[in-house]
Amino acid sequence: AQRVTQPEKLLSVFKGAPVELKCNYSYSGSPELFWYVQYSRQRLQLLLRHISRESIKGFTADLNKGETSFHLKKPFAQEEDSAMYYCAPLIPGNTGKLIFGQGTTLQVKP
Amino acid sequence: GAGVSQSPSNKVTEKGKDVELRCDPISGHTALYWYRQSLGQGLEFLIYFQGNSAPDKSGLPSDRFSAERTGGSVSTLTIQRTQQEDSAVYLCASSLRWAAQETQYFGPGTRLLVL
């Protein structure tokens, strides 16, 4: 079965510390991968996607096909990064159908 | 322009009643998606539309759930004979096309509470 796993429900770090939010997937083929973020009282929104290879708000994510992982990283966390983060592989087959992980709440303490 | 809008923002209903949830996608977006966000369940895909057609309904939890889209725009998610386990936030998203790599833009959600 196609699955995505975010093993940490809550990740708590201090401001300025490095952050890594883990995501592992199990899909045949090479899915396109996204990270979505939901800040408090805001809509779910796209943070970044693998195909763009871009860095948004200092976050990057590297696809590791060997480990089937797409961990989200930031070298120095900021308080405004506190939010719920979802890893979402796109199901191969060109449908646009996203399967979200359970989500990880990132809490950045001052 | 305006983003994805959903109505109502909150809905409280009694067990056994039918409810209709509405989604207005971004103008010109041909693809529309429904998701459900439950406590402890994360985000769950329900159904998507390519234009007015829904090629994959396998994500709908039961036959009490149905959805339609008319005019390639507004979509309605209907839940018949609501149960307490239907309580969740129902999210709608739209994208310019139904192809892969398209960014999905989410609405604010409808919070449904079934008493």
Image (tube, coloured by chain):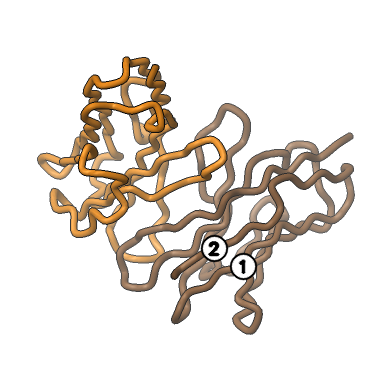
Chain colours: A brown, B orange
Residue underneath mark 2: A4
Residue at position x 84%, y 52% from top? Answer: A76
What amino acid is labelled 1 in the image? Asn
Say which quadrant the C terminus of chain B sits in.
Answer: top left
User: Which quadrant is home to the N terminus of chain B?
Assistant: top left
In the displayed structure image, the side of residue A21 where residue B63 appears, left or right? left
Measuring 26% from the left and 44% from the top, which residue is drawn there?
B62
Identify whether A12 is placed above or below A94: above
B64 is higher (above) or lower (below) than B95:
above
Task: Say if mark 1 contacts mark 2, CB within 8 Å.
Answer: yes
**Residue hosting label 1:** A24
Q: Of helix, strand and loop, which one carries label 2?
A: strand
Residue drawn at (57%, 57%) of the image? A87
Report, in whole angstroms, how far the alpha carbon at label 1 lies from the one at label 2: 6 Å
Tell me the kind of residue under disc 2: Val
- Name the mark on residue B53: none
Q: Nearer the viewer, residue A26 or B93?
A: A26
* Above-or-below relation of A96 to B94: below
Question: Please, which chain is the residue tagged with disc 2 on?
Answer: A
